[in-house]
Amino acid sequence: MSRSVVITGLGPITAFGAGIEPLFDALLEGRSAVRRIERFDPTGFPCQIAAELPDDRFSVRKVVPKSYRKATKVMCRDIELAVGAAAAAVEDAQLVTKAADPDAEPTVPGHRFGCHIGAGLIAADVDELAAALMTSRNGEGQFDIGHWGSAGMENLTPLWLLKYLPNMLACHVTIIHDCRGPSNTITCCEASSGLSLGESMRVIERGSADACLTGGAEFKLNPMAFARQIFAQRLAEATGEGVDPTTVARPFDPQARGTVLGEGGGILVLEAQDIAQARGAEPYALVAGFASTQSFCPDTVGLQLPEDGDGLAEAIEGALREADMGIGDIDAIVPFGSSIPNVDQGEAAAVRRVFGDRASSIPLITTVPNVGNCNAGNGAVGLCVAAKCLREQKLPARINTSGANGLDANSCGARDAKLETILVCSSSQGGQNAAVVLKRT
């Protein structure tokens, strides 16, 4: 038996805060949260801007049960973001879980509640790691790897590794909300959220769970993670007082010169449609189709994807087939829209291949200029925005882009629109592609 799957809760977490309302309001108004980095000193880096989530807009200690606050000491920022996003999604779906009241009857029994969260390859905190490394210097003051292996690493905090394992995002979320159904972690860069939603969809369809928390989150605003993106030639050069950070990311613009990072992502509540109906939930959207593919990717550092976009196009075509829809059924598209020139080129080629003459008239919804590229969480941001657009029958404003060739991607204001179906798709740094078709309920 194949069950229909709907989205009943949205929990994006971005530089604008946790929850769909602050994000969607900012997108409608065309605001950008990209600023000069404050979490570390970016002086010396060719890119010095990002979209950071301020401490006054989110505290993980305020969204976990009091009994769980001690565990926040072993949460890296990526885990905190996932936990915050899950809390927002559960609240938005009006679910009762163990987090709210351990003695209350849960909306979804724990053994029927799954969890699939996309994560990145988490970089350790530089200060924390350096403090331990300093204890392994030899007599000349140089680092001694032999001493580090035999004794130095013991100067890391005892539970150090548990802060940085990618599966710990789902681990904490499942413990907090008592999700004892199928669980998994997917680490496929920007495609991670879409792939996670696809796995949650399949789990519910085949009856292995009644609901799942799904999505992704990532934090790359750490000197080591940030440097890796620079070495991969993905970030726009942005330094000095003459740069307006809010205008740097320009998806599909001929003048685009690279992406801008953001911290965040999102968790969504997926439910079997019959379960949602039984409890009187009002779904945002039906998950009508999903597909994934792998592009040939000879260079996974700089991501020199094929310019024809064939891999992503095949994912889009697969999602449309599963949804039993044609190219005339899609009313809007939420692409990766990274502002990385060769990635944008591949995405544009994929859209043109699938939609032909319609490609220039289907409005694109872009989020990277507003909240940065949230990496493993980027697809979840797009999914949340798409679902909200379907409910509100509105398209957000687009900023920065001009001169986009053959795509409806140039700057414009927010507007009302008749929206029945939205495609959310993404390529990734490793060549994985994911496509999801959402339909208005």
Image: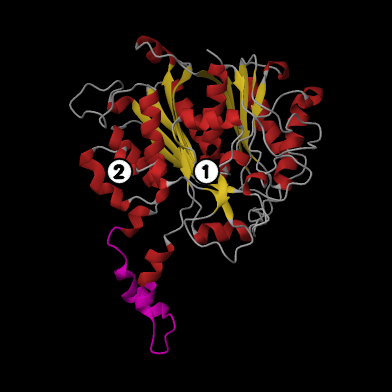
Residue at (50% x, 54% y) in the render:
221
Instruction: Kindly identify the residue that appears in the image at 38 percent across and 45 percent down.
Output: 80
Quadrant (top left/top right/bottom left/bottom right) for the N terminus: top left
Q: CA distance from mark 1 to mark 2?
A: 23 Å
- Among the 4 quarters of the image, the one containing residue 182: top left
Quickly name the residue at label 2.
Answer: 61
Percent of width and height locating residue 168: 37, 46
Apparent side of residue 343 relative to residue 129 in the rendered image (left or right): right
User: Which portion, as a residue range, is magenta?
Assistant: 133-159
- Report whether residue 256 is seen: yes
Q: Left or right? Give the position of 182 relative to 24.
A: left
For residue 225, above or below residue 216: below
Q: Is residue 185 above or below residue 142?
A: above
**Residue 26 is a magenta residue:** no
x and y percentages locating residue 324 in the rendered image: 63, 16
User: Which of 254/301 is in front?
Assistant: 254
Q: Which of 91/225 is in front?
A: 91
Q: Is residue 144 magenta?
A: yes
Residue 208 in view: no
Q: Nearer the viewer, residue 157 or 258?
A: 258
Mark 1 or mark 2: name the one nearer the start of the chain: 2
Q: Residue at x 52, y 43 (%)?
A: 376
Q: Label 1: which residue?
A: 376
